[in-house]
Image: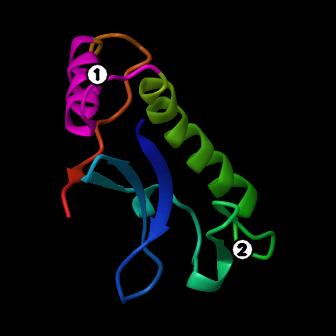
Amino acid sequence: MITINYQMFGNKGFQLRLRLYQDGETKFINVTKLLKGSIQKRHWNQKKQLFIPSCPFSDENNSILVQFRQKYDEAAINWTGSVFGMIAAMETARQDNAGTPHYHAVYPICDR
């Protein structure tokens, strides 16, 4: 089973990434660039995986995070392979659908 959650990282400013983990294999996707406003570490609630109401653009940013994570959650539901294999399959599907109006930009994926 693939575990998916958000986590802060880095020492300068607020940085957030989506973490995908299974059997020792971890992949990260930086989502900071998708967020609006000037966000600080104190605005993030790690337990609830969302921004607190006093955060600038908290409603918009929480909505962005839910939508972004949803496609990975859906892909992971019945996935039997590795994290890398799931992400590769998702990338292939995006490339195959590049000409359709529902195409989304490919986000960079990085290893630890």
Name the element at disc 2.
loop
Most distant residue in the right direction: 53
Q: Amino acid under label 1?
A: Arg
Q: Amino acid under label 2?
A: Cys
Query: Which residue is drawn at the image coordinates 37% and 48% (left, top)?
Result: 20
Query: Which residue is drawn at the image coordinates 27% and 53% (left, top)?
Result: 26
Find disc 1 in the rendering and name its residue: 94
Query: Which residue is drawn at the image coordinates 45% and 46% (left, top)?
Result: 3
Would you say residue 95 sits in the magenta stretch? yes
Would you say residue 87 sits in the magenta stretch? yes
- Residue 98: image quadrant is top left
- Locate residue 39 relative to residue 7 in the image: left or right: right
Give the number of marks: 2
Name the element at disc 1.
helix
Most distant residue in the bottom direction: 11
Magenta stretch secondary structure, dominant: helix
Question: In the rendered image, which quarter contains the N terminus?
Answer: top left
Residue 7 location, x and y as percent?
47, 66
Residue 72 location, x and y as percent?
44, 34
Calculate the distance from the C-alpha at mark 2 to the C-alpha at mark 1: 32 Å
The figure's colour scheme reads: rainbow
What range of the chain is rendered magenta?
Answer: 78-96
N-terminal-most mark, 2 or 1: 2
